[in-house]
């Protein structure tokens, strides 16, 4: 579950009412009711539902709510004074508000029930100073041994030997020969990103209180100010024959039941990854496309006849998807 190779389906979030409270047993039943995306170990697909289950397992095994255990084992020992589980009813000093854009206008975050502000797939308040202390702990053995940290940062292998660029809760990327471990988060009008450049011994942490922000892109750009070869490659739009758009249109399966939809409208090409909103993508070449609003790229794969048979999604690593239609 930590490596997202369990097969536990993330479609669970489309089958619950985020404004309704559930017991832990309710959540387990709802997650268990969704068929596995694949047999454990066979593939990789991000699943917050797996982390929800892990938090419940922690509670069952220790008798303590996972948030209380986090405070006891991590937050307090590291001096992360403001880190805590979300509680909108509590009075929290200096609490930021989360926002999103609706038709270009700033709106407050959508409300969710207390249940979904306490599950182990996120649901944390913290400050930038908390994150600095967390990052410093990862450079030491205060929480885990060096061997355990290296295991956490080793790419997982599927049962057929394929390597996926993800460890235990961290994406693992190589940037021009520099080792990068990173992760982003998003919830209720907030977005975050931590990028740890292991070889260069520095980290960039970005916290944003706008759902439409791209903290990953900001973090990578800041890294490039310090080490030029870490700067993200600049993507430039190229003029191509737009008749190729019709070859790209279709659904691409990145994992069982998880698709990337490519559509074309009014001479523009759009990509919708899983349940995200469609975003326009722009051509760098006849096979390479990129988003301008996020650090996401697509490479379309052609066969010998020039037909598009799949694509590669580049987002915190590279992931292949087969064209279904």
Image (spheres, rainbow, N blue to C red):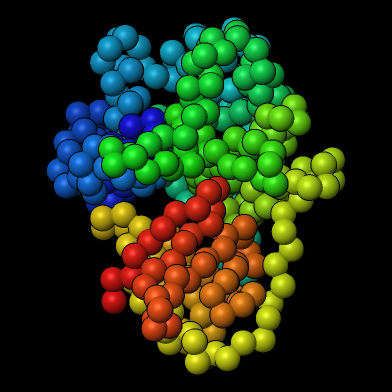
Q: Which image quarter is the C terminus in? A: bottom left
The residue shown at (26%, 58%) is: 257
Measured as percent of width and height from the top left, residue 57 is found at 28, 21
Position of 3 relative to 15 (above/below): above
- Residue 288 placement, left or right of 301: right
Q: Is residue 48 above or below residue 62?
A: below
Q: Residue at x 75, y 27 (%)?
A: 201
- Rendered residue at 25%/28% (across/down): 24
Q: Name the spot of residue 188 as percent of width and height, x first.
A: 51, 46
* Residue 1 locus on image (x, y percent): 33, 32
- Whether residue 8 sits left or right of residue 222 in the image: it is left
Give me the residue at 70% from left, 67% from top: 235
Q: Is residue 95 visible?
A: yes
Residue 55 position, x and y percent, is 35, 25
Q: Is residue 96 visible?
A: no
Instruction: From the viewer's perspective, tell me whether residue 304 is left or right of residue 105.
Output: left
In the image, taking residue 21 as reference, residue 34 lies left or right, namely left
């Amino acid at each position: 579950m930590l490596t997202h190779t369990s097969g536990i389906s993330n479609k669970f979030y489309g089958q619950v009412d985020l404004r309704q409270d559930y017991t832990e047993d309710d959540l387990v039943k709802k997650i268990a009711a969704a068929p596995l995306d694949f047999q454990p170990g066979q593939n990789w697909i991000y699943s917050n539902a797996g982390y929800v289950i892990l938090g419940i397992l922690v509670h069952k095994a220790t008798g303590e709510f996972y948030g209380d255990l986090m405070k006891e084992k991590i937050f307090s020992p590291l001096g992360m004074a403001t880190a805590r589980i979300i509680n909108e009813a509590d009075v929290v000093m200096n609490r930021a508000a989360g926002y999103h854009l609706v038709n270009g206008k700033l709106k407050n975050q959508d409300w969710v029930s207390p249940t979904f502000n306490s599950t182990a797939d996120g649901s944390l308040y913290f400050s930038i100073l908390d994150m600095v202390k967390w990052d410093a702990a990862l450079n030491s053995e205060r929480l885990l041994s060096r061997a355990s940290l290296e295991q956490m940062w080793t790419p997982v292998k599927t049962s057929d030997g394929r390597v996926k660029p993800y460890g235990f809760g961290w994406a693992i990327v190589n940037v021009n020969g520099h080792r990068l471990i990173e992760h982003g988060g998003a919830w209720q009008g907030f977005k975050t990103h931590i990028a740890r450049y292991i070889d260069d011994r520095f980290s960039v942490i970005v916290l944003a209180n706008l759902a439409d922000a791209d903290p990953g892109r900001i973090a990578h750009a800041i890294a490039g100010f310090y080490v030029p070869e870490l700067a993200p490659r600049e993507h430039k739009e190229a003029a191509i024959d737009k008749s190729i758009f019709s070859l790209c249109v279709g659904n691409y399966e990145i994992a069982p039941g998880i698709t990337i939809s490519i559509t074309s409208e009014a001479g523009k090409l759009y990509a919708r990854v899983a349940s995200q909103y469609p975003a326009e993508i722009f051509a760098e070449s006849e096979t390479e496309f990129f988003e301008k609003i996020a650090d996401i790229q697509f490479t379309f794969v052609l066969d010998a006849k020039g037909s598009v048979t799949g694509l590669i999604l580049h987002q915190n690593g590279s992931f292949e998807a087969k064209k279904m239609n």
